[in-house]
């Protein structure tokens, strides 16, 4: 069986065209991956900055709450055990 040269040439040409298409598509995919990778890096940087700001804010709120807790705790202790309770007892008849 002999394949005519024109058929062989057209099959070879199709193969080359498909390889070229594959190379171009792989280049486009690589470019898209690079773009996505850049976007991910940018998002990671933004997330890190937000985490830092939140960490600072959490510390501020924690310190503020601890101050309020200490203040209220001191007031409760004063109400339970006034420092001068013995003077009240001595003043009563």
Image (cartoon, rainbow, N blue to C red):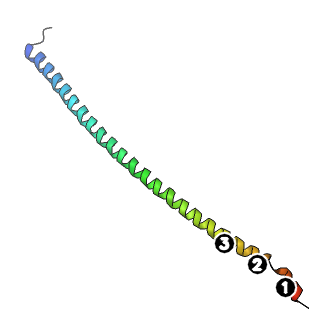
Between residues 6 and 77, which one lies in front from this camera angle? Answer: 77
At x 75%, y 76%, the residue is: 78
Mark 3 residue element = helix
Which-is-in-front pick, marks 1 and 2?
1
Residue 8 located left or right of residue 23: left
Please provide percent x and percent y for residue 64. 58, 67
Residue 59 located left or right of residue 4: right
Q: Are marks 2 and 3 in contact (CB under 8 Å)?
A: no
Between residues 69 and 29, which one lies in front from this camera angle? Answer: 69
Which-is-in-front pick, marks 1 and 3?
1
Position of 80 relative to 9 (above/below): below
Residue that sits furthest to the left in the current view: 6
At x 66%, y 68%, the residue is: 69
- Residue 28's quadrant in the figure? top left
Is disc 2 surrounded by few (<14), some (14 to 19) or many (20+) residues within 10 Å?
Answer: few
Sequence order check: which comes first, mark 1 or mark 3?
Answer: 3
Is disc 1 surrounded by few (<14), some (14 to 19) or many (20+) residues within 10 Å?
Answer: few
Please provide percent x and percent y for residue 32. 28, 40
Sequence order check: which comes first, mark 1 or mark 2?
Answer: 2
Position of 19 relative to 92 (above/below): above
Residue 65 located left or right of residue 82: left
At x 13%, y 22%, the residue is: 13
Disc 2 target residue: 79
- Mark 1 and mark 3: Cα distance apart in space: 24 Å
At x 50%, y 61%, the residue is: 57
- Residue 19's quadrant in the figure? top left
Disc 1 target residue: 88
Mark 1 residue element = helix
- Mark 1 and mark 2: Cα distance apart in space: 14 Å
Q: Which mark is residue 71?
A: 3
């Amino acid at each position: 069986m002999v394949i005519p040269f024109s058929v062989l040439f057209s099959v070879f040409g199709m193969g080359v065209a498909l390889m070229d298409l594959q190379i171009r598509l792989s280049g486009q995919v690589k470019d898209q991956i690079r773009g996505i990778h850049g976007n991910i890096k940018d998002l990671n940087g933004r997330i890190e900055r937000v985490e830092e700001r939140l960490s600072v804010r959490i510390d501020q709120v924690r310190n503020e709450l601890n101050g309020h807790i200490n203040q209220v705790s001191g007031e409760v202790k004063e109400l339970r055990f006034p420092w001068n309770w013995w003077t009240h007892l001595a003043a009563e008849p």
